[in-house]
Each structure stands twice: as structure tokens, then as C-alpha cells.
Image (spheres, helix red, strand yellow):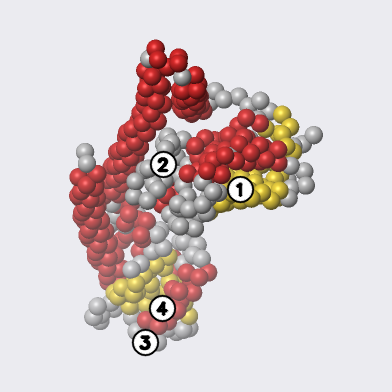
């Protein structure tokens, strides 16, 4: 599937999921509002019945207009013309609530206009802050100081309503799981798509890298097959050197692939010994002397570490530095300039490799250590390689107990900082 079509599929799928989830939230909200409305109506009826029972007990025939008011979502006030004992009120409220299946904890208050005081019940142990809210609300909403009233507060109303919406909560959780699995599936598809593209790019690069020396060897062999070549020893020697050089190049390319395969299978064993990191740097710089001269480049070293001895595998440590310097030269559009420095850092040594190459964007830096990934030079992948160098560097730095950091800006070069722990002898 082409990337454009894949993006369209993902877009439409995301819109569909968002739409379904939005409808689910809409109906859950509607269901909650309906549950709350029914709850408020049942509480209103229950409190109205309590008010009538109080009037009957006190043989009060006066009419009360709208004796029940809802002050907040979980707090109700009811007006009475008569005083009432707290324990009697608690009993009447419990009976009315149970009759209407309101089986949740509640707290009540009772205002006595004779003493101008508010008495709390002992049904629920309210927090101090909640009591203050109830008291202040009651004082603010009282009808007048010549009236008796009582209030009922439901501290767990929201939990009660949510518990009554079990089927809606269950369906929402199930939908969330579906969305989570769907998102994971899309992520896997995108990742596999990208991996497929990277592998295809790797195969193309590998084919080119292996085909070139093979073709050169084949041509040289054909020339050497000519009987007349023996009459020109210098030419014979040149073609023999070409075959040797291309064979070495082919061997190195195959070794790189096999090396990465062994790393993936975690079969690499380090031959650990005490290594002088400065010797590694100097050896690497010497190895690049001819390439730097050909490109009119230079390597500047600033080795300040007092004790550059670390424990590690000299071969792999050399390969780490070789890959970084090699990339610095390959990914440079001008005369390459590479700065290599060392310094003491906590309980180890910090190695820094800085270049003046093309640099990398933030997006490229996210993938640069991934296997087979290659930073394009300009608009094309015109730099030879398999895209396994920096992945190898990362794995080997970690195997040596170190850490690597990258700082780069487009057109401003890149800086790699590697920390190695010191040798403890």
C-alpha cells in the first residue's frame, strides 16, 4: 500500500473512532443526567413526604408552598413550621429513602429558630470543610429566622449515580479497550510499513555495494585472461592490485553485515582488556590520513584526559571511532574538518567527535541510531553504506557500559559525546 493511501486510511479510521467515542460520551452524559434527574425527583418526593408527616405529628394544617428546595447537586433544604427532634427526623428520613431505593449515606442538619442554631446529625462523619460548606449554605439559603427547616446532604451522590450506570460504564471501558487495540494495530502497521521501506532501501544499497567490487573483479579477471597481458608486467601488477583491493572491500562489506547479524543475536563477546583511549584516537586519525589528504580535510585532536585508560575491546573501540570519523567525512559538502577531544568526566572519560558536515534535523536525529537508517545527503541517498554504522556504535557503547549523546543542526555539523567509565584496577 502506498504511503498516501495508508495515511488516508489512518485518517478516516481516526475520524471514525473519534466519532464513535464522541457518540458514546454523548449518550453516557445523557444517561447520567437522566439518572441525576430521577434521583433528585425521588429525593424531592421523599422530603416532601417527611414535611407532611411532621405537620401531621404536630397537627399543623397550614399549607406550605414548595417546602423543598435543591440548593446544590447533592444538598436539599426542607421548610417546616414546627420544631423536630433530631433522632425522629433521622428515622423518618431513613424510612422514606429506603422506600424509594435511595440506599446511599446521607447527613442531615436541623435548624431551630428558637435558639437560632444548626444541629448536625450523626449518620455520616463529614469532613470539617464539608460541614463548613453545609453550614454556610444553610445560613445563606434559610427562608427566615422565624421558620424551622432541615437539610439533607449526600456526600457520595456522584459515586451512587455512577454505580447505577454500570452498563454504560462497562460499555465505555470496552470501547476504550477497542480504541486502544485499534491504535496499537495502526501503530504496528505504520511501523511495519516503515520497516519494509527501510529494508528495501538496505537491500538496494547492499546490492549496489556488493555488485560494484564484483563487477570490478570480473573486469580485471577478464583482462588478466588475455594472453598478451603477460608481456606488460606493470599492467599485470595493477590489475592484480585492483582485484586484491576490491576483494578486501568486498570482505569488509560482508563482515559488516555479519557483524550486525551477530549483534542482533547477542553473540558478540568482548575481549576486555585495559585500553588507552588516546592510542585508539591516534591510530584512527593515522588510518584516515590518506582519505583526508584526498579531500583536503583535517582532523584536530585535543586529548586532555589525565588517565585515558579504560576497560574494553580495542577492536570494537576502534570501530566506534572509525564509524564516527568516516561519517563525518562522507556527510560533508566542503573540506571536512573533524575535531576529536577527550576530557575527564565524573568517574570516567568523555570522548567528543565534532564535524562540519551537513548536520541533521530533529526528525533525523530520532532515527539516526536505528538499523538501516541513512541520513540523506541533499535530496538523495548518494552516500555509500548500509545504514548500520551508528546502530553498531550505539550497541557497542552500551556494551562497554557507556552512553552516547548527539547534538546537531542542519548545515552546522554534528557533535557526538560518548562517556566511558574509567578502568578500576
Q: Quarter of the image containing the C terminus?
A: top right
Residue lying at 73% horizontally and 50% vertically, measured from the top left = 304
Tell me the mark number nearer the camera, choosing from 2 and 3.
2
- Look at mark 2 in the image and give the residue it sits on: 383
Tell me the mark number nearer the camera, choosing from 2 and 4.
2
Q: CA distance from mark 2 to mark 3?
A: 89 Å
- Look at mark 3 in the image and give the residue it sits on: 144
- Look at mark 4 in the image and give the residue it sits on: 138
Query: Horizontal and vertical percent for residue 377?
Result: 40, 48
Could you classify mark 4 by the number of other residues whose Cα lies within 10 Å: few (under 14), some (14-19), or many (20 or more)? many
Residue reaching furthest to the right: 425
Q: Is residue 55 visible?
A: no
Q: Earlier along the polypeptide chain: callout 4 or callout 1? A: 4
SS for callout 3: loop
Could you classify mark 2 by the number of other residues whose Cα lies within 10 Å: few (under 14), some (14-19), or many (20 or more)? some
Label annotation for residue 299:
1
Q: CA distance from mark 2 to mark 4?
A: 79 Å
Q: Is residue 224 above or below residue 303?
A: above
Amino acid at each position: 500500500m502506498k504511503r498516501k493511501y495508508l495515511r488516508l486510511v489512518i485518517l478516516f479510521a481516526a475520524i471514525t473512532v473519534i466519532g464513535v467515542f464522541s457518540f458514546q460520551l454523548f449518550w453516557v452524559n445523557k444517561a447520567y443526567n437522566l439518572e441525576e434527574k430521577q434521583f433528585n425527583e425521588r429525593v424531592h418526593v421523599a422530603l416532601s413526604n417527611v414535611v407532611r408527616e411532621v405537620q401531621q405529628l404536630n397537627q399543623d394544617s397550614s399549607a406550605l408552598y414548595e417546602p423543598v428546595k435543591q440548593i446544590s447537586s447533592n444538598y436539599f433544604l426542607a421548610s417546616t413550621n414546627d420544631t423536630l427532634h433530631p433522632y425522629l427526623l433521622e428515622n423518618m428520613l431513613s424510612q422514606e429513602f429506603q422506600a424509594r431505593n435511595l440506599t446511599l449515606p446521607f447527613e442531615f442538619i436541623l435548624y431551630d429558630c428558637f435558639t437560632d442554631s444548626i444541629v448536625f446529625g450523626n449518620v455520616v462523619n463529614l469532613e470539617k470543610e464539608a460541614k463548613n460548606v453545609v453550614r454556610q449554605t444553610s445560613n445563606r439559603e434559610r427562608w427566615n429566622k422565624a421558620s424551622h427547616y432541615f437539610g439533607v446532604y449526600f456526600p457520595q451522590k456522584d459515586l451512587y449515580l455512577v454505580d447505577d450506570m454500570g452498563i454504560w460504564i462497562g460499555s465505555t471501558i470496552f470501547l476504550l479497550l477497542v480504541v486502544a487495540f485499534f491504535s496499537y494495530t495502526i501503530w504496528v502497521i505504520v511501523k511495519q510499513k516503515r520497516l519494509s521501506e527501510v529494508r528495501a532501501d538496505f537491500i538496494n544499497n547492499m546490492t549496489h555495494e556488493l555488485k560494484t567490487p564484483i563487477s570490478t573483479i570480473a573486469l580485471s579477471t577478464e583482462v588478466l585472461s588475455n594472453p598478451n597481458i603477460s608481456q606488460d608486467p606493470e599492467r599485470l601488477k595493477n590489475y592484480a592490485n585492483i582485484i586484491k583491493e576490491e576483494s578486501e572491500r568486498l570482505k569488509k562489506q560482508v563482515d559488516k553485515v555479519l557483524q550486525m547479524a551477530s549483534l542482533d543475536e547477542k553473540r558478540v563477546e568482548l575481549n576486555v582488556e585495559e585500553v588507552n583511549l588516546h592510542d585508539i584516537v591516534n591510530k584512527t586519525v593515522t588510518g584516515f590520513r590518506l582519505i583526508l589528504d584526498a579531500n583536503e580535510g583535517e582532523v584536530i585532536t585535543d586529548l586532555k584526559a589525565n588517565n585515558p585508560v579504560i576497560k574494553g575491546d580495542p577492536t570494537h573501540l576502534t570501530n566506534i571511532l572509525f564509524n564516527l570519523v568516516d561519517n563525518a567525512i562522507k556527510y560533508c559538502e566542503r573540506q571536512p574538518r573533524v575535531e576529536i577531544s577527550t576530557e575527564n568526566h565524573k568517574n570516567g572519560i568523555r570522548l567528543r567527535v565534532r564535524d562540519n558536515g551537513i548536520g541533521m534535523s530533529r526528525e533525523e536525529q530520532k532515527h539516526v541510531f536505528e538499523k538501516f537508517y541513512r541520513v540523506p545527503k541533499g535530496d538523495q541517498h548518494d552516500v555509500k553504506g548500509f545504514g548500520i554504522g551508528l546502530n553498531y556504535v550505539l550497541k557497542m557503547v552500551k556494551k562497554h557500559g557507556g552512553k552516547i549523546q548527539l547534538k546537531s543542526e542542519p548545515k552546522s555539523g554534528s557533535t557526538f559525546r560518548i562517556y566511558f567509565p574509567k578502568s578500576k584496577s
